[in-house]
Image: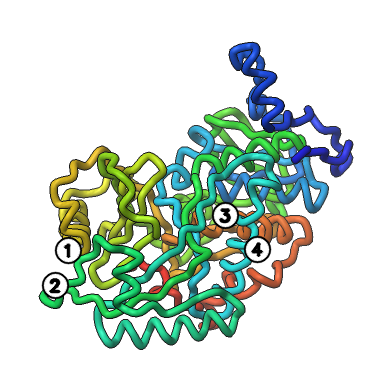
């Protein structure tokens, strides 16, 4: 796919032309030992002022910048990241994408995100390594069977693919599961979304960054926001950073686990709590798992990477923290859970463990939209659903920033729902105990 952006966006000229990745360019650069590839994005110095400042250089922030420039012709944008691009939650998740949600509002939004994922590599001219291998939600009791049927019917009413799978067919698809009658958690069946799967988290961030930069967006790394400034009338005036003050009439907070910290700089208290969420990977093994498996009762989810590693996630650390270390009891419980499901992996060695910071709202649904402070916008509270929401989050949030009104898909997820009691409780569909 050849990427040809318009010559000017929002009155600002493009900084450069994005090189096309293709078989031809690969062969051409092979002759020069791959020494002539241009940088995927620039590292500019911050300008004194922008039309929009996006705080957070993860997937959601970069997707917002991409769609602001592409769809709304607003390219005088700065994405400020306190560390390195994609080094927060974007680089610390378990890469699952799906849209198997219960309530209409969530189902419509996450289905839009999955649809965008399906064409994202072509749109960005960057392989995000989407693998729609399917996602299997296991049922271990009659209660879970009833719930699975309910969710399957709800999904089909919303035009989302779903099917209930019998116990026998689950074992055919996932032969290494413990399906014995004496298992601690007997297998009763499963709910399958065949279009679910995984994508490469780094590639998603890099693809959006590369495209946004080609449109003229400034991506500024190692630039921590230390304050949010308001003028005499209370409107947003800009931000203070470790690299100086930057003015802008619109500031968008897209900073995952630190959303509430940044909102407090503008005098807003959000109904969000932050917890570490751990994950880990095993040593590589031969292919044994060609579907993402999730069990809410045993409380573990697992997929196999292209390198053969088993990628696993489990419960939140129960204490609130901004630490990215996690705790040993959660790892121990996670190992016990995976061995209950797959006894064959009991002798596998674990290679590495990490933790991200998840920001959780009372109803396990996000906040995306305007705030009471004019010119300040929030995109956060995603809990454990952030990565799968990345494309639709940026698509809809860019609409809100450009039009100063919510996108129809995200209008139900505004901040006012907490005062009005219009909660969208997706705690069960989150697949993680919140």
User: In this orientation, which residue lies closer to the viewer: 69 or 305?
Assistant: 305
Residue 227 lies, with reference to residue 47, above or below; the image says: below
User: In this orientation, which residue lies closer to the viewer: 239 or 220?
Assistant: 220
Tag 2 near tag 1, CB within 8 Å? yes
Q: Which residue, given by chain and number where applicable, does mark 2 sit on? A: 183
Q: Which mark is residue 370?
A: 4
Q: Position of residue 134 (x, y in %)?
A: 46, 63
State the CA–CA distance, disc 2 to disc 1.
Answer: 8 Å
Mark nearer the N terminus (3 vs 4):
4
Frontmost of labels 1 and 3 is 1
Q: Secondary structure at mark 2?
A: loop
Tag 4 near tag 2, CB within 8 Å? no
Q: Which residue, given by chain and number where applicable, does mark 1 sit on? A: 340
Tag 1 near tag 4, CB within 8 Å? no
> Residue lying furthest left in this view?
182
Q: Which mark is residue 390?
A: 3
Mark nearer the N terminus (4 vs 2):
2
Q: Position of residue 37 (x, y in %)?
A: 65, 20
Q: Quadrant of the N terminus?
A: top right
State the CA–CA distance, disc 2 to disc 3.
Answer: 38 Å
Q: Relative to 373, is 290 on the left or the right? A: left
């Amino acid at each position: 796919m050849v990427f040809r952006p318009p010559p000017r966006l929002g009155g600002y000229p493009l900084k450069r032309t994005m090189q096309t990745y293709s078989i031809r360019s690969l062969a051409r650069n092979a002759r020069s030992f791959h020494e002539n590839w241009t940088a995927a994005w620039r590292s500019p110095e911050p300008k004194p002022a922008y039309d929009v400042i996006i705080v957070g250089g993860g997937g959601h922030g970069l997707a917002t910048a991409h769609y602001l420039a592409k769809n709304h012709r607003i390219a005088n944008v700065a994405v400020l990241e306190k560390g390195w691009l994609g080094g927060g939650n974007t680089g610390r998740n378990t890469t699952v994408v799906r849209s198997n949600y219960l309530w209409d509002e969530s189902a419509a939004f996450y289905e839009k995100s999955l649809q965008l994922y399906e064409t994202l590599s072509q749109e960005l001219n960057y392989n995000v390594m989407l693998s729609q291998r399917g996602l299997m939600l296991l049922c271990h009791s009659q209660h879970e069977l009833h719930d699975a049927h309910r969710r399957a019917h709800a999904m089909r009413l919303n035009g989302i693919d779903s099917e209930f799978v019998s116990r026998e067919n689950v074992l055919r698809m996932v032969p290494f599961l413990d399906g014995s009658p004496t298992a601690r958690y007997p297998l009763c069946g499963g709910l399958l979304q065949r279009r679910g799967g995984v994508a490469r988290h780094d590639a998603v961030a890099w693809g959006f960054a590369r495209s946004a930069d080609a449109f003229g967006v400034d991506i500024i790394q190692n630039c921590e926001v230390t304050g949010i400034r308001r003028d005499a009338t209370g409107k947003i005036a800009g931000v203070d950073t470790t690299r100086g003050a930057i003015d802008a009439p619109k500031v968008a907070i897209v900073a995952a686990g630190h959303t509430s910290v940044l909102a407090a700089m503008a005098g807003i208290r959000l109904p969000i709590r932050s917890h570490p969420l751990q994950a880990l990977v095993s040593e590589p093994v031969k292919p044994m798992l060609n579907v993402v498996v999730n069990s809410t009762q045993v409380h573990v989810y697992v997929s196999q990477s292209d390198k053969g590693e088993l990628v696993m996630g489990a419960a939140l650390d129960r204490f609130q923290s901004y630490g990215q270390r996690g705790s040993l009891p959660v790892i121990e419980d996670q190992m016990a859970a995976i061995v209950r499901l797959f006894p064959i992996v009991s002798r596998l060695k674990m290679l590495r463990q990490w933790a991200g910071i998840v920001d959780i709202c009372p109803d396990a649904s996000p906040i995306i939209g305007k705030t009471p402070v004019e010119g300040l916008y929030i995109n956060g509270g995603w809990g454990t659903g952030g990565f799968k929401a990345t494309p639709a989050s940026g698509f809809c949030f860019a609409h809100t920033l450009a039009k100063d009104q919510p996108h129809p898909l995200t209008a139900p997820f505004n901040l006012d729902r907490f005062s009005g009691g219009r909660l969208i409780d997706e705690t069960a569909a989150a697949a993680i105990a919140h």
